[in-house]
Amino acid sequence: MKISQLYGESGPLHGRDVFIVGTGPSLACWRPEEFAGETCVLLNTAQRYVPWGPVAFSNHRRFLDGCDLPYQIVKGRLVEASRKKTPDRITTDNHCRWDDPKYYVFSYRSPWLWDAWDHFDDKALWREPDFYWNVKGGSVSIFAMQFAALAGAKSITMLGTDCSELIRKYHPRMDRDRGAKQVKHNYRAYWAGAMRMKREIWQRFGIRVGFETPWIGYGDERIKYQELVEWLSQSA
């Protein structure tokens, strides 16, 4: 199913104050029961810690194993096995097609295949309802912010979206085929992309986005300071 089926007045986020919940260290500041009754978009494995949704939003469906929330969203992308453009060799990197009966699917553009532009290009932003934009090195939270805006959220609050580790640039991740490896996370890109999306959502939809995440060790300190000054001036 396509993610655009969740847009509009009948969708799960329309007219609601939405919390986008990640699995960063700051999530430990909140008790799971505090989210009961709230409208949450739970990123990747966050639904294992916060059992209320109604939406689970993931980069890969392996993160949703055992999830029973009513709306499960997965990034799916048509890619070519052996790089040959033959219909019988086309699969998806998430093994999740548009017509999957369980998952709502969004995708992205990539000229590595057959697209004329990629999802890092600004012209891709808001261009197609089922294809999302991101910055290079960006995170799943930026995709989720686009979904919340397109689905008609009243407001958006980001919680626990401060990555897997604070201050560190690398952390080990287990890979099924190659064992443990070092995965670089571009924290500056995470924050810059989130700030860009916050501005875009306000300008296009008039929806305010707030961040309840630590200020230390995440992104560009100058950008964060400017953001804090702006928030304080608006709250005065």
Image: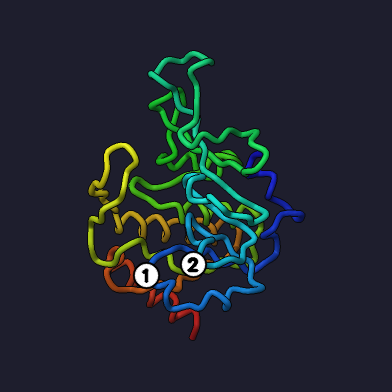
- How crowded pointer 2 is (Cα within 10 Å; few <14, some 14-19, many 20+) is rated as many
Q: Is residue 188 left or right of residue 22?
A: left
Q: Position of residue 15 (x, y in %)?
A: 70, 64
In front: 131, or 87? 87
Residue that sits furthest to the right in the current view: 10
Q: Position of residue 186 (x, y in %)?
A: 29, 53
Q: Is residue 60 left or right of residue 12?
A: left
* Residue at numbered disc 1: 25
Q: Is residue 162 left or right of residue 51?
A: left
In front: 111, or 223? 111
Q: Position of residue 63 (x, y in %)?
A: 48, 50
Q: Residue at x 39, y 65 (%)?
A: 24
Amino acid type of the residue tagged 2 in the rendering? Met
* Residue at numbered disc 2: 158
In front: 99, or 110? 99
Q: Position of residue 112 (x, y in %)?
A: 38, 27
Which of discs 2 and 1 lies nearer the camera? The answer is 1
- Identify the image quadrant of residue 155: bottom right
Give the mark nearest the N terminus, 2 or 1: 1
Vertical side of 101 occupied by 148: above or below? below
Could you say whether the residue bearing mark 1 is in a helix, strand or loop? helix
Q: Residue at x 47, y 69 (%)?
A: 159
**Tag 2–tag 1 contact (CB < 8 Å):** no
Vertical side of 117 occupied by 188: above or below? below
Amino acid type of the residue tagged 1 in the rendering? Pro
> Which quarter of the rendered picture does the N terminus lie within?
top right
